[in-house]
Image (cartoon, coloured by chain):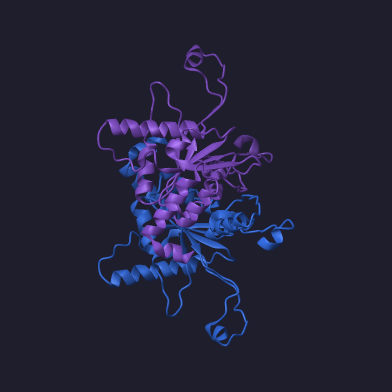
Chain colours: A purple, B blue
């Protein structure tokens, strides 16, 4: 790409904003090293479009990625980041794994260039994995996790398209939803301001959950209700 | 706007992404209450376009706003947020104040609808204010601030336009730059990964500063150099 760019105009299209991924900064550094000039055209990205769920962008902490587990590899370090965010009151945007052009271990070892069908982690799978971590930590003794099956989450599907879908509910509820075709993302909510609760209530799996939370919030902090 | 939207199609254009500001969630809640349907078209925003400076988006903490000081009102609470971010290694995007259609106190009291010319805080003014807080806290005794005149910052001007400009340097250096026409933003950097340092170096006010930082980083953490 950089070689061709020395003699002609080359465009490189990406999904979302070009700087959501480290890779593209690296590409620019290498372009500069080779004397190739560049121009960036910014775009909307799930990193800011997630605001459509009503959770305020400035209340989001570090973004995490949830990857597909295998039989032998079940990482859960993203749960520590969600915990740090929640302990600071912040929401966590969880980007869900995408497997495209992956080879099975067998085909990889045999050197066969046969690719598995693409897989996109959905909200149900992501929430189920989080619940499994919650249960595993619980079995191990007192848990440091700052979330559990009752933590409020938001499922997002196909954001920005005409078929976009939002659902709000507990982590337990999220592990049972079918949000249809990819791409999906999951938000684990932190401290919820009443206006955020009211937005989530508009696409709640169970409205009563949010009515109860709003009631509790206003009992704790009546001045918030006065301010509405 | 909502009244008209009951009988016809109404478009509401905003700068950046519609959910960068709390106001627009509130507008949607009121639309839903009045039975007005809506469709959001997402857009790039400085909240993600800031990635063009080479600092990784997932390393940004809470965004802050720096407001114009008056003779009697000099808030500096954003410095506490920058401190929290830096103590966690995170960068801070500082959005700079915009004053449009403001009345002078005199005209406001006289009820005269005469508006002051629009003012846009520039990088130099923002950095100067931050330096003033640093000096004030220093005068008051041991300071809790996690930044000073030597902290690496990035000035951004007119991002996304053909005349966009980036400058990287210390806070002290930023207080002396002229980055031209608005809009400006300022980033106070947190922990800098070598790849981030290399990107900043490409638009450094003083390249030697970044060569020195890269040298120190690799002395501390030689495995990072091996990984390059």
A29 relative to B185, above or below: above
Determine the residue positioned at 40% across, 63% down. A222
Return the x and y of residue B6 as percentages of the image width and height. 70, 58
Q: How many marks?
A: 0
Q: Quadrant of residue A4?
A: top right
Return the x and y of residue A17 as percentages of the image width and height. 57, 45
Q: Quadrant of residue B142?
A: bottom left
Comparing A135 with A201, the one in front is A201
Quadrant position of the N terminus of chain B in the picture: bottom right
Comparing B11 with A44, the one in front is B11
Return the x and y of residue A8 as percentages of the image width and height. 69, 39
Residue B11 appears left or right of A139: right
Comparing A183 with B219, the one in front is A183
Residue B9 appears left or right of A223: right
Residue A20 appears left or right of A76: right
Determine the residue positioned at 31% across, 44% down. B220
Farthest residue, direction bottom? B110
Return the x and y of residue A173 as percentages of the image width and height. 46, 37
Quadrant position of the C terminus of chain B in the picture: top left
């Amino acid at each position: 790409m950089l070689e061709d760019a020395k003699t002609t105009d080359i465009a490189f299209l990406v999904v979302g904003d070009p700087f959501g991924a480290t890779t593209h900064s690296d590409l620019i550094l290498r372009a500069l090293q080779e004397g190739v000039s560049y121009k960036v055209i910014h775009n909307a990205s799930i990193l800011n479009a997630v605001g459509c769920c009503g959770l305020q962008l400035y209340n989001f902490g570090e973004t995490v990625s949830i990857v597909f587990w295998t039989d032998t590899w079940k990482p859960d370090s993203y749960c520590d980041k969600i915990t740090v965010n929640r302990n600071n009151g912040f929401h966590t945007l969880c980007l869900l794994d995408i497997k495209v052009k992956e080879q099975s271990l067998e085909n990889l070892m045999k050197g066969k260039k046969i690719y598995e069908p693409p897989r996109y982690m959905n909200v149900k799978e992501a929430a189920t994995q989080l619940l499994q971590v919650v249960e595993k930590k619980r079995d191990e003794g007192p848990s440091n996790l700052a979330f559990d099956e009752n933590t409020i989450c938001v499922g997002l599907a196909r954001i920005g398209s005409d078929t976009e879908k939002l659902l709000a509910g507990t982590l337990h509820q999220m592990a049972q939803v079918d949000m249809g075709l990819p791409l999906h993302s999951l938000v684990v909510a932190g401290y919820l301001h009443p206006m955020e609760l009211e937005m989530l209530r508009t696409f709640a799996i169970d409205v009563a959950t949010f009515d109860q939370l709003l009631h509790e919030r206003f009992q704790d902090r009546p001045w918030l209700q006065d301010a509405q």
